[in-house]
Amino acid sequence: MYLKGENITFGYKKDNLILKDVNISLGSGEIMGLVGDSGSGKSTLCKILAGYETRYKGKVSLDGKPLPAKGYNPVQLIFQHPEKAVNPKWKMKDILNEGHTVSQDILDSFGIKKSWLNRWPNELSGGELQRFALARALSPKTRFLIADEITTMVDAITQAQIWNVLLGIVEELNIGVLVVSHDRNLINRVCHDIIYLKDISSA
Ligand SMILES: Nc1ncnc2c1ncn2[C@@H]1O[C@H](COP(=O)(O)OP(=O)(O)OP(=O)(O)O)[C@@H](O)[C@H]1O
């Protein structure tokens, strides 16, 4: 299965393009790094590929078909700030199991403690909350994961732990991953391939 972006062209304002004719193809089980200067449009491309931003020109497809308009999104996007992706009025157990019941194995792998399930999102650290976001996104229905600076808020040891767990699960489920990070060590360590996004705003 392939997630493709073809000739993606986009600007938040008409006369100021951020992305121009960007092509990207990500296969199942592939781990691809997306790097580029700050402001070059990496997060914007992530949002387009996951269907969050739809005002672009070009084509996004999953095995040749558009992303499903309703129901579960097989292209899951995880951001740098997990607190923005959760409902602050829901307890963690409800947030976690909203789409499907997350397996105990996945909870254990990410080191999610039972006592955390009864907490509110603001009672967890950024790193703890991010484990929930990942556990929730790794549903059996997920085909691609877009990881936009997902471990920027944690220390190096925690970063390594989270990535080890994540890579194990995506390999098992044959999920393709797009990894956005300014940390070149991380990119070099985990990615099979790297694509570079050129900043066109100064061109
Ligand atoms: N919602 C928005 N409205 C208007 N402009 C935006 C919006 N989001 C981002 N931008 C602008 O679009 C450009 C690309 O932003 P984007 O966040 O995609 O870059 P990035 O490569 O992910 O940057 P960084 O590495 O700093 O996170 C930037 O100039 C940014 O200011």
Image (cartoon, grey):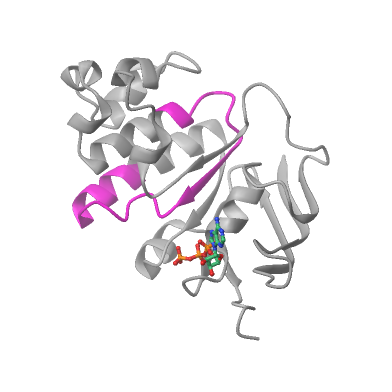
Give the quarter of the image for residue 40.
bottom right
Query: Where is the N terminus found, in terms of image quarters?
Result: top right
Look at the picture and state if 102 lies above or below 7.
above
* Residue 35 horizontal/vertical position (percent): 51, 68
For the point 43% across and 63% down, which residue is it? 187
For the point 53% across and 31% down, which residue is it? 173
Left/right of residue 128 with respect to residue 65 in the rendered view: left
* Residue 56 horizontal/vertical position (percent): 74, 55
Q: Can residue 33 be seen in this view?
A: no
Left/right of residue 37 with respect to residue 80 in the rendered view: right
Query: Where is the C terminus found, in terms of image quarters?
Result: bottom right
In front of the other: 67 or 123: 123
For the point 20% across and 39% down, which residue is it? 125
* Residue 79 horizontal/vertical position (percent): 43, 46
Q: Is residue 121 visible?
A: yes
Give the quarter of the image for residue 155.
bottom left
Q: Is residue 73 shown in magenta?
A: no
Left/right of residue 118 with respect to residue 73 in the rendered view: left
Look at the picture and state if 5 lies above or below 51.
below
Left/right of residue 64 with respect to residue 193 in the rendered view: right
Look at the picture and state if 116 lies above or below 34.
above
Q: What stretch is highlighted in magenta?
A: 136-164
* Residue 88 horizontal/vertical position (percent): 32, 27
In front of the other: 167 or 71: 71
Q: Is residue 155 shown in magenta?
A: yes
